[in-house]
Structures are given as C-alpha cells and as structure tokens.
Amino acid sequence: MSTFEQTTTPLRTTRPGSDGEHQVQRRMGTAERADRFYAEQVLDRLNPRMREFVTRQEMFFLATADRHGECDNTFRAGPPGFLHVLDDVTLAYPEYRGNGIHASLGNIEENPHVGVLLVDFLRDRIGLHVNGRAAIVADEDMRRAHSTLAVDPVPGRRALVWVVITVEEAYIHCAKHIPHLQRIPAGGAGRSWGTDDLKRKGGDFFGAAADAPARGPFLPPPRANAATWRAEAERALARAARRDPDAGTRGTGAQNFSGWFHRSTPS
C-alpha cells in the first residue's frame, strides 16, 4: 500500500454523507470537490455563527421519512427563537395541534432521522442545513428540564409536545439562487395563530375537495349522515330496552330514559 493510500483511506471511511452520494460523486467526477466541501464546511455541531443565525430565523423546512423511506417535507414558522438552540449540538421546537395529521411526528416515531433547512430570505440571503436525530418530548418534561422556556399565551399556540434534535451535520446552503425578499407591514389583525377559521387557514385553495371522487384510496370510508345515526341509535336503545326493561329506572331518583335523540311533543 502506498503512503498516499495509507493517509487517505481512513479519511474516506469517515466522510459525511451517504454511500449513494459518494457513488454519484465518483461517477460524476466530483469526489475531490465534494471532499473539499466536507472538510471546510460540514461540522458535527453548531458553531457560534450558526447558533446566532438559528436564533433569529422565523421559519424552517423539515424533512422526515417513515420506516419504509416514504418522505414528507413540511414548513414550520414562529417568532424569532421559536427554534431553540439548547446547546451546540441540540435544537428544539414546539409542535402544536395543527390539522391533526401529525405526519412529521408520526415519521419521527418510526424513524428519528430528520433534515432541517433554514433560509434567510430577508437579510443575509443564505441557508443552513442541519441533519440529525429527533426525539418527541412531552411539554411538561421539556419545561422541567428547561425552566426558562416561555409559555405562549396565544390560544392554539401552546405546545402539545416538543421535537428535540441532536445535531449530526451542519453546513451552509449557498446564496446563489436564494431570492432576496422584503418584509411588508402586517395588515389587519396580523397572523391568525392557532385559528380554526377555514378561510383564514387557506380553505380549499387547491380545489382538492372538488376532486375528491378521483382520489380513490385516499378517501376516508363513507360516514353515515345524521338521520342514519339517529335511526341506528334508536334501534340500539330499543334492543336494550327489550333486554332489560327496568334499565332506565335504576338509581336514586332516576326517571325513565327515553333516548338521547328523544324529541318532545310541543304542548
């Protein structure tokens, strides 16, 4: 083995990135350029400038995948500092009720690997990638461990759980194609944090509900309408009454139970 091979082989076994990207680099002839990027730009922690960058961001993109590798990418936003820097290898952010799907949390439950992309469109026009492993932590446990975390007073913005990310890789996303945006004054009541108003949440902007019949397997099973539920409930009550006619008179001062859907006759 040559001296060159002796000095470079151990480094190759610890290169950042996946086996797949290394194979593509060799096929595309970019391995040497990639090695320079790995050596000069990829850290296994957040340095002081990265930590300062994170604390003033108001949004990030989160990539997750389930145990089968099926991917999901989503957007998170909040006031500056909502993505908390706990130390140079730990980030944390709160998860709220959302639409009830909890796709990201569900993926993390199966597969802890996550990718975070923060992009500053307003000032520095630069991005930061953070890859690592995530864990779901109950709000009370998080506040017990970190007593300085503020409690958000806005309804709908109180954390259900927290996602804690252990940093494994942190590196720059170049500014070359990041658009430079400008902030505009918020109009009206500002952001509708935690709202359940369908219109304020965006409504059916993409017309998915109108295309529902074409979605096939993504449709939920059909639900009975109110009249069907009422009839079924009344039949169940009638069967119960036939089996145990005294069921409605048990207990202190109990009156005959006429059913949840009983409609009194106007006098």
Image (tube, rainbow, N blue to C red):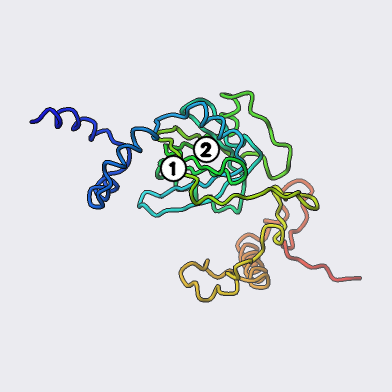
Residue at image coords 54%, 34%: 92
Q: Nearer the viewer, residue 77 or 162?
A: 77
> Which quadrant is the N terminus positioned in?
top left
Residue 116, how many percent across, how many down? 48, 42
The answer to which image quadrant residue 53 occupies is: top right
The single residue placed furthest to the left in the displayed view is 1
The single residue placed furthest to the right in the displayed view is 267
Residue 142, above or below 208: above
Residue 110, above or below 13: below
Secondary element at tag 2: strand
Secondary element at tag 1: strand
Residue 223, how many percent across, how many down? 58, 69
Residue 57, above or below 90: below
Residue 111, how many percent across, how many down? 40, 44
Nearer-N-terminus badge (2/1)? 1
Residue 216, above or below 127: below
Residue at image coords 71%, 52%: 195
Residue at image coords 37%, 33%: 40
**How many numbered marks appear?**
2
Q: Amino acid at mark 1?
A: Val
Q: Nearer the viewer, residue 184 or 217?
A: 184
Query: Which of the two discs, 2 and 1, sits closer to the camera?
Result: 1
Q: Are marks 2 and 1 in contact (CB under 8 Å)?
A: yes
Residue 15, how many percent across, how many down? 28, 36
Image disc number at residue 163? 2
The answer to which image quadrant residue 206 occupies is: bottom right
Image disc number at residue 114? 1
Task: Classify residue 252 as left or right of residue 62.
Answer: right
> Which quadrant is the C terminus positioned in?
bottom right
Q: Amino acid at mark 2?
A: Val
